[in-house]
Amino acid sequence: MTTIDGECGPILAKGGRESGKPFSSGGGKGSGNGDGTFHKRLGPIDFDASLKAAVKAVRHNLAIVMLFTVISNILVLAIPIYLFQISDRVLTSRSIETLVMLTVIIVGAILLQAMFDALRRFILMRTAVEVAANLGAPILGAAARASLQGSGKEYQTLGDLQQVRSFLVSRTLLSFLDAPIAPLFVTAVFLIHVDLGIIVVATAIVLLILTQINQKLTATPFAEANTAQVKANLHVESMSRNSQIINALAMIPEAVRIWGRDTASSLRAQVVAQDRNIMMAALSKAVRLLTQVALLGWGAFLSLEGQLTGGMVIAASIIAGRALAPIEGAIEGWNQYSQARAAYGRITALLTSSPLAFERLSLPKPEGRLDVERLLYVPQGTKRVVLNGLSFCLQPGDSLAVIGNSGAGKTTLGKMLVGSILPTSGSVRLDLMDLRNWDQRQFGENIGYLPQDVQLFPGTIKANIARMRTDIDDEAIYRAAVLADVHEMIANLPHGYETMVAADGSPLSGGQKQRIALARAFFGDPRFVVLDEPNSNLDGAGDAALKRALTHAKEHGITVVTITQRPELLQTVDKILLLVNGTVALFGMRQDVLQALSSRGISVECGSFGHQLQ
Ligand SMILES: Nc1ncnc2c1ncn2[C@@H]1O[C@H](COP(=O)(O)OP(=O)(O)OP(=O)(O)O)[C@@H](O)[C@H]1O
C-alpha cells in the first residue's frame, strides 16, 4: 500500500527531495553556479508509471475483493437453505436437535458473511485512498502544465479523481462485483424448479433492457449538468481571485448572478436526469416485486400440484431476490458509473498527453543567446494577428528594451520569449535550442520573468523569492535580493525575509510586490530575464533600484529584455526594439534607434512615450 506523503509531488518525488533540506544559512552552494542542487536535472515525470501503479493497485485489490465477494455470496445462501430445512425438515420431523444444530450453523455463516462483507469494504476504501495517493500529485502537476494552453479547466481533473475515488467505495461497485455471482443464484432457482428459473431469467432480461434505456435517457442531461457545474466552479474560483475588486466595485450581485445562472442550469439538467433515473429505478423495483409475486404465486400453484414444497418456494423467492439485486443496483448506480468512467478517461488523457512526461536532452547551462525567427501569433479561435513575422537576435549579456504603443503586442512577445505561450509559427531559441525542445524544468530554472500583473504566493518573502523551493541555501535568496537591489527594502520590513505575504500580496504595497517579484525573476542566477513593465508601480527610489538591478544584471552577463513605456530605463539598455501593431518597426543599438525616433519627431526624454508611437 502506498505511503501517503503530503510533500511528495510529481517533481519532488523524482529526486528533489533526497537533496532537499530546509533553508539553511551559509554553505555557498545553491543557485546557478552549476555545483549546487538548483540546476540538478530531474528528468521527465513518469505519469505513465503513476497511472499503471494506480491501475495495478485497483486490479490487485479488486481480485481479492472478488474472492471475498464469492465467499460472502455463497454464505448468503445459508438463509434460504435454513428456511428450506426448517419448513421441510424441522417442522415435519419436529426435531429440536436438528433446529439447534441448523441455527448454530446459520449463526456462524451469517457472522462469517458479515466479516467478509466488512473486509471487502475495508479493502475498497484503502484502494480508493491508494488511487488518490498515487494520482493526486501527478494530476495536479500535469494540470498545471496543461492549463498553459488551456482555460484552467484542467485543474478540475482533481475533481475527477474525487469522482473515481467515490465510485471505488460506492454501493454501485459492490453491485457490479456481485453481478458475476448472479448466475449461481439463477442456477439454484432452476434446480428448485425450471419454471421459477425461467421467471428469474425473464426478469433479469427485462431489468437489463431497463438499464440500457436508463443509460440512454440520462446520459445527455447528466453531461449537461456536469458541464454547467464545471462553469459554475470556475466562476467561483475567479470570484475568490478577484474578491477585492468585486467588493470595491460592489459587483457581488452580478458575480453571484453569473454563478446562479450556471448552477441553475446544472440543477435543471440534474432534475431532468434524476427524474428519469428515479422513474427507471421505480420501474425496475416494481418489476422485481412483481417477480416475487410471480415466483410465490406460481410456486404455490406448483406446490398444490405436488411438484414443490412450501419451503422450496420461499427459498426460491429469497435466492431470486439475491440474483436480481445486483442488476437493480447497477441501474440505480449507472450514472455514477458512467461519470466515474468519463472522469477516469479525462485523467488518463491528461496524464498520457502531458508534455512533462517526455524526455528532453539535458543541455549545458545556457549562456543567454536569444534568436527570434519569423514569429507569428494568431490566438486560437481568433483571426487576429497579434505578432507578425518578428525576427531579432540578442547576444549573451545584451539588454534590450521593447517599446511600443498600448496593444502593440509587447506583453504577448514577452510571454512568448519565456515559453508561456507558443507561437503559431516561427520560433524562439535560447542558445540555439527552440524553447519547445528545452527540458521544461531546466529552462525554467535558467530564466527569470516578471509579469505585468504581479502575483505572489501566500508564504514568506524568502519562499517567494526562492520560487517556493525548499532545497536551496539562504545565500541564493540573498544573492537574488542583492542582484535585484531589494535587500535594503526587505531589511526595512518588520520581519525582513520572514514577512508573511497573503494571497492578495498584503502587507506589501504594489511597488514592494513588484520589487520582490523582480528578486524572484533574478533568483537562481538566470541567464535570460524578461521584465514586463518592471517600474509600473515604482516610485523614484524604486526606479533607481531597478536601474541598479539592470546594471548588476549587465555585470553578471545576463541577457535582459525589458518591456517598458517609460523613457528612464532606455538609458540602461544596449538595444531598443520598437513594436508597432505586432511587427518590428525599429531594432538596433540604443543610440541609433533613439536617433531614428527623434528624426520621426518622437521624444523619449520625459514621461511616458507610448502614445507617440502610433
Ligand atoms: N489570446 C488572445 N486573444 C485575442 N487577442 C489577444 C490575445 N492575446 C493578445 N491579444 C491582443 O493582442 C494585442 C496585443 O496585446 P498585448 O497585451 O501584447 O499588448 P501590449 O503591447 O503589451 O499592450 P500594453 O502596453 O497595453 O500592455 C491586444 O490587442 C490584445 O487584445
Image: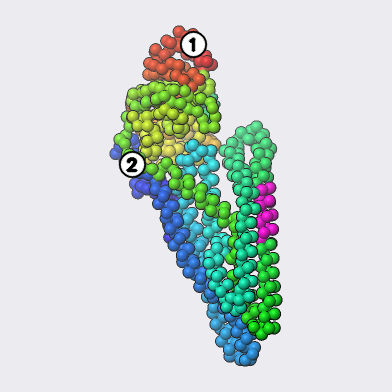
**Residue at image x 68%, y 39%?**
257
**Residue closest to the eye, 182 or 608:** 182
- Residue stretch rendered in magenta on the structure: 267-281
Task: Decide whether the magenta segment is chiefly helix, strand or loop.
Answer: helix
Q: Which mark is residue 11?
A: none
**Residue closest to the eye, 208 or 531:** 208
311 in magenta: no
What residue does disc 2 label?
A: 40
What residue does disc 1 label?
A: 602
Disc 1 CB within 8 Å of nearest ligand 1 atom: no
271 in magenta: yes
**Residue at image x 36%, y 26%?**
370
Residue 326's quadrant in the figure? bottom right
**Residue at image x 61%, y 57%?**
212
All told, the count of numbered labels is 2
**Residue closest to the eye, 565 or 461:** 565
Three-letter amino acid code of the residue under disc 1: Ile
